[in-house]
Amino acid sequence: MSATQTFRIASIPADGVGKEVVAAGRRVLDAVAENSGGKFEFRWTEFPWGCEYYERTGQMMDENGLEALKAFDAIYFGAVGWENVPDHVSLWGLRLNITQNFDQWANVRPVKFLPGVQSPLRKADHTELDWVVVRENSEGEYAGLGGRNLAGRGPGNEVALQTALFTEKGCERIMRFAFDLARTRTVKKVSSVTKSNAQQYGMVLWDDVFKRVALDYPDVQTESVLVDAMSAKFILRPEDLSVVVASNLNADILSDLGSALAGSLGLAASANLNPERRFPSMFEPVHGSAPDIAGQGISNPIGAIASAALMLDHFGLHQEARLVEAAIEAATAGGHLTRDVGGSATTDEVTDAVVVALSRSLSAV
Ligand SMILES: NC(=O)c1ccc[n+]([C@@H]2O[C@H](COP(=O)([O-])OP(=O)(O)OC[C@H]3O[C@@H](n4cnc5c(N)ncnc54)[C@H](O)[C@@H]3O)[C@@H](O)[C@H]2O)c1
């Protein structure tokens, strides 16, 4: 028998429902490994970072945390944010600290419609819908550039600047990523999301790079759509979408819209990739810490489990990734649904259903 391959994974559940859904995803991944016939195993190390850690230490993660994370093959993340820490402090202190410093510049967010989950979109009942949002994840509106504090001018006169950064290299690499991804899909099309009518510097550069990169992919259809029109298109003509490439903020908003159309924020998966593999990539559900339902055991684990499938793809375990996705579909089609998608199942019950479906198909392989 060949040697077992070990994948070292850093798990960072962080806050709120992050803890519940990461536990669910770990169970599924461990079930995949157990059924691999000794081909591979996952070695987990859990880090206690997040808002409780901040309460104790005044920091969102350990000072040497990034150094520690470099040793892992991937990071499996829950969600960050709690009422004891301002959101911009918790987000920049943990999640953005990792994505920015590990140059995880491509954020892949598939929009998937699942059997048994009712979409608020009537069209979804009789139309095949499946697209993926590719988000520029290293610059744009989340470059962290700007400043605040001209408070010396006196009360009521403070000024803040939040500057978006667009570089030709940053635009080009995310667009090539989107085109390469489109080539792997049935519908070979990339839709670029812009706002160059109003943002005449950064977004015009974005458009220019898109036109130039498109010339290298004559086999891929293209369109350039203003972000306001694209939000309407997500609802009215989603069947026209395959790969949607957008800047950091625009893609963040549009991917939430996409997951809401699929039925819930709790369903959406994401991969923060460093495609050159100089640093570990990070896999996490799109949703936040959901303080309104945290601790009740009713959070939807599917976004986190589907993110685990994206991690399997990253490891080259494509067959296993497809089996996890099929197990998710078997669970939802079988009516194992949490409250956010109209059911009454708990997080554990949905996870059980996925694990059962998975074990059945893995033992048949
Ligand atoms: N990637 C991240 O870590 C991330 C992303 C978004 C928001 N946040 C943080 O999360 C906190 C809450 O933010 P928010 O309320 O705007 O967004 P949220 O995603 O936490 O919640 C929005 C809505 O979606 C529901 N929801 C989210 N995940 C769900 C799940 N798995 N199952 C069922 N329902 C789910 C919530 O109950 C809520 O009604 C804030 O501190 C915010 O900064 C973190």
Image (cartoon, rainbow, N blue to C red):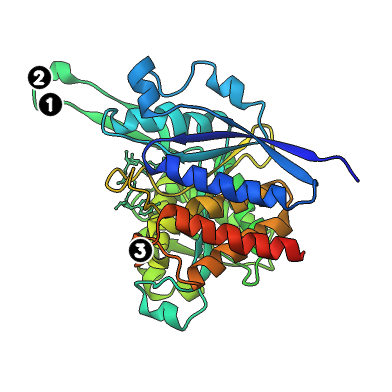
Q: How far apart are marks 2 and 1 (CA)?
A: 6 Å
* Contact, mark 2 vs mark 1 (Cβ under 8 Å): yes
Front residue of 51 and 299: 299
Tell whether circle 3 marks a residue whose Cβ is less than 8 angstroms from ligand 1.
Answer: no
Give how far apart the Cα atoms at labels 3 and 2 are.
54 Å
Q: Callout 3, which amino acid?
A: Ser
Amino acid type at circle 1 is Asn
Look at discs 1 and 3 and give the one toward the viewer. Answer: 3
Is residue 77 visible in this depiction of the protein? yes
State which mark lies toward you, 3 or 2.
3
Q: Which residue is denoted by mark 2 in the rendering?
A: 154
Q: Position of residue 15 (x, y in %)?
A: 39, 36
Q: Which of marks 1 and 3 is nearer the N terminus?
A: 1
User: Which quadrant would residue 20 be assigned to in this image?
Assistant: top left
* Most foreground residue, 203 or 40: 40
Indicate the position of residue 147 as horizontal and vertical percent values: 31, 25
Is residue 107 among what the camera can see?
no
Name the residue beneath numbered marker 3: 344
Residue at 71% in and 46% down: 315
Q: Is residue 198 left or right of residue 135?
A: left
**Mark 1 = which residue?**
157
